[in-house]
Image (cartoon, rainbow, N blue to C red):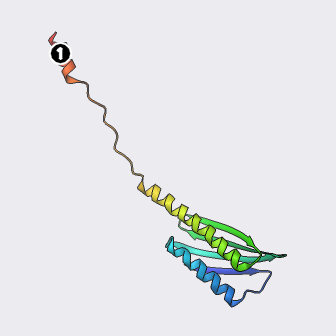
Amino acid sequence: MEIRTTARHFELSDNLKTFAENEIKRLEKYYDHIIDCHLTMSVEKSRQIAELTVKVYGTMLTSKAKAFDMYVAIEQVIAKMESQIKKYKSRLKDKKGVKKSPPKKRPAADEDNVGEDEME
């Protein structure tokens, strides 16, 4: 899994970067086929915004969180992504579990009734 972090309108500290990477690595606990993660952190006035995009086979999952503290925003965006990954994984299991059932056989005509009609 490749992790990329981007900071907009502020200087990214090493502590914040390592915290974010450790939180993102926790996502592998829920789904281990994650290809790429991109965390974008930005500051707008007093709001701290964290946006996480996760690329998995076949789709892109995104989540966004706003808070007054960047650490809280990162925790919120990771929590949202955990639930999305769980839903995605359950959808994959549902698709895999559905198998084509063999065609149903029509009940054959009652042979006893046919025999009685012929005897009469």
**For residue 6, above or below residue 66:** below
Which x, y percent locates residue 68?
A: 77, 75
> Which residue is at 67% across, 89% downward?
15
Mark 1 highlights which residue? 116
Which x, y percent locates residue 56?
A: 55, 68
Left or right of residue 89, residue 105 in this image: left
Q: Nearer the viewer, residue 33 or 19?
A: 19
Task: Provide the secondary structure element on which disc 1 rests.
Answer: helix
Left or right of residue 45, residue 87 in this image: left
**For residue 117, above or below residue 27:** above
Residue at the farthest right position? 45
Q: Residues within 10 Å of mark 1 (few under 14, many from 20)?
A: few
**For residue 96, above or below residue 11:** above
The quarter holding residue 88 reads bottom right
Which x, y percent locates residue 16?
A: 68, 85
> Which residue is at 20% across, 13% downward?
117
Quarter of the image where the C terminus is located: top left
Circle 1: residue type: Glu
Quarter of the image where the N terminus is located: bottom right
Residue at the farthest top position? 120
Which x, y percent locates residue 21?
A: 61, 82
Residue at the farthest bottom position? 14
Tell me how many marks there are: 1
The quarter holding residue 71 reads bottom right
